[in-house]
Every structure is written in C-alpha cells, then in structure tokens.
Amino acid sequence: MKITTYPTHLKNHQRFLKIKQLIDEFLPKQGYTKVEAPLLSPVLLPESYLDIFATAYRYFQKPQELYLTPSSELFLKRLLASGIGSCYTLDQVFRNSEPTVSKHNFEFTMLELYKVSANYFQIAADTLALLRFIAQKLFGKPELIYQGKVMKLDSFETVTVAEVFENYAQIPDIFNHQQFFSAAKARGYRIEENFSYVDLWSEIYSLAVEPHLGMNGRATLIYDYPKELAAMVNYNSQKQVAERLELYIAGVELGNCGNETSSKGVRKQFEQRFKEEIHERKRLGKSNYEVDWEFLDVLEQLPKTAGIAIGVDRLAMLFCDVRSIEELKVVGIK
C-alpha cells in the first residue's frame, strides 16, 4: 500500500465535509448530544461478522494491547446507562479484512446515534428527516439524484425481511433452518461444505435481495430479521424476530438500526450470545482479542433506546452522485 493523492476529487471531498457539518447542525436541534469517543480500546464486543486492527500501548510497564474501534457502541451505551440521554458520535472507525472496493474501506466515517424512549421506526424517521435536511441544504429540495435516478426523501418503502426473500429469492420461510436450506438448494443457490445458516442467508441476501432495495424512487426500510442476524438487538419472542432494520437507497446500504434490549435479567441471554459469537470468530479464524464482559452489566442498565449506525462515506456517495467512496477522498491509502 502507498499514500495516494486525488486532487481531482476536491469538489466531492468538500461536499463530504459539508455533509458532516450539516449532520452536526441538525442532530443537536433534535435533542441529540454529540460526544467524542476513543478510537482505541482495551476491549471490544465479540462480533463474528468483522475483524479488527490491533496495536499496543507502551510506557515502561508491560505493553497493553489496544484495538482500533469498529464502532462507538461500547462507549455510547455506557453513557446511556449513566443517563446522558439521546446522543451520537461522528467518528472514524476501523474494520480489518474489508475489501477496498466501491462501497467498502477498512477505515470510514460512521454516524452512530441512540434515541432514548424511542423504537427503531422512530429513529429511522429521524434519519429520513436528516436526509431531507441535507438534501434541502445542498439542492434546495427534499430529494437527490443518483446515477440518473430521482430518489425522493419524503417517505420510506417499508418491507419485512421475510417478504423480500419470498419476493426476490422465492424462498417462503427464512426462519426454519431446514426448510430454508431445502428451498435454497431447490432454487439452485450455491451451498458450500460447512455453510452455516448465516453463511447461506448472507449469500442469498447479497445476490438476490440487496440489488432490489431502494430502487423504486424512495429509500427502502427493511425490518424484522432472524435472530441469528441481529445479535445485539431486542428479540421479539411473540413475533419471533429480531427488532432490527436497515435503510437502503439505490441499492446502497446506509444504516443498520435496532431496538436495544433494556429489561432486567438480559445479562444471561447476552452472555450466551457473546459465547456464540466468540465460538464463531474462532471457527472463521478471525483475530483473538479481549472481550468487553463488563458490557453485559451495562445492558441491564440501559433505558428504552433505539440506535442506528450510518456509513457517512456511503451517504456522501449518494449526495455526490459518485459510484465509489474513493471518489470522495483527496488523500488516501491504496
């Protein structure tokens, strides 16, 4: 890798910086407090779908291993449990083993916000209001044009995960593992040896479902996931779904949102999830690191909260009408 400059991208980069300014202008007016979180941490949450960068702090004593944070969640939820109220960070985050392709990079800007006394649909509505605000400031109207397609920001197209799998992948039951594998095999999807349910689900989702989302002139809000695809959000036992949603515009995933589990007694439930995630990380051969076991106590102290994480680089891609996040940079590593 080497340091690369992109002076021709200056106009896009300036708009990217303007978008971050507009986020900081809008959210405090909606009752969110901005906080700065550390970019290094001695512990992390066990998340099997990502990998991390490790370094060490040295000052006479034995070096202490530290990790570049893949999100601000472990910090923000401590603040929520302490009573800070609705809050957000707008920081760089880091994820190892990420491909440097059009919509991915190992370092990117994430907007992570949590709203107290709210559910995931309410924070999604705040997000849509933020997008309208940005569009109004940049273009003078509540819409954007991406790759020749007008995307209106007045409302969502809403659909459940089960509905999109049936509509686009012709798989009618995504919750029963045995039936899911059988239906996928019958429809010719590739099933590798030792494929887990999550492996197969993710493959079908990326190939058959994701390209259709946010393609009908509005953002798509897709919600209610299998519990295996949403380890850290509330599980609705009555509906048998994890209360998680994602936002898409023009096939681009913008945000991942969920209702946070806040009831007493959830420590045991999440302790089991942590162990499952640690086991899965080992199965996948991912980096070993110190797990934030104290976070389990934090979860029992959370107020009713919904949270969302938004990739600001991808968001800026849409508002700059470019195909790659690389086109937002004036300096980068490649």
Image (cartoon, rainbow, N blue to C red):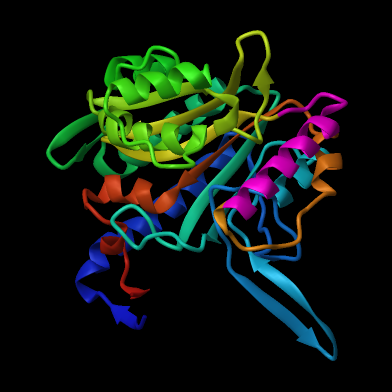
Residue, far left: 148
Outermost residue toward the bottom in this view: 60
Q: Residue 93: where, in percent of width, then height?
A: 54, 59
Furthest residue toward top = 238
Magenta stretch: helix, strand or loop mostly:
helix
Q: Is residue 20 above or below residue 59?
A: above
Q: Residue 252: tell me if it is visible.
A: yes
The region drawn magenta spans 261-283
Q: Position of residue 22 (x, y in %)?
A: 44, 48
**Residue 154 visible in rendering:** no
Could you say which is closer to the camera, residue 229 or residue 263?
229
Instruction: Report if residue 208 lies within the magenta region.
Output: no
Q: Where residue 199 sits in the image (x, y, percent)?
A: 46, 39
- Is residue 312 rendered to the left or right of residue 292? left
Q: Is residue 69 left or right of residue 75?
A: left
Identify the image quadrant of residue 60: bottom right
Q: Quadrant of the N terminus?
A: bottom left
Residue 233 x/y as whole percent: 65, 30
Determine the residue positioned at 39% across, 41% down.
Answer: 192
Quadrant housing the C terminus: bottom left
Q: Is residue 181 left or right of residue 137?
A: right
Q: Quadrant of residue 307?
A: top right
Q: Is residue 268 above or below residue 295?
A: above
Q: Is residue 132 above or below residue 47?
A: above
> Which one is nearer the viewer's eye here, 156 or 204?
204
Locate residue 322 relative to residue 301 in the image: left or right. left
- The residue sitting at 77% across, 46% down in the picture is 79
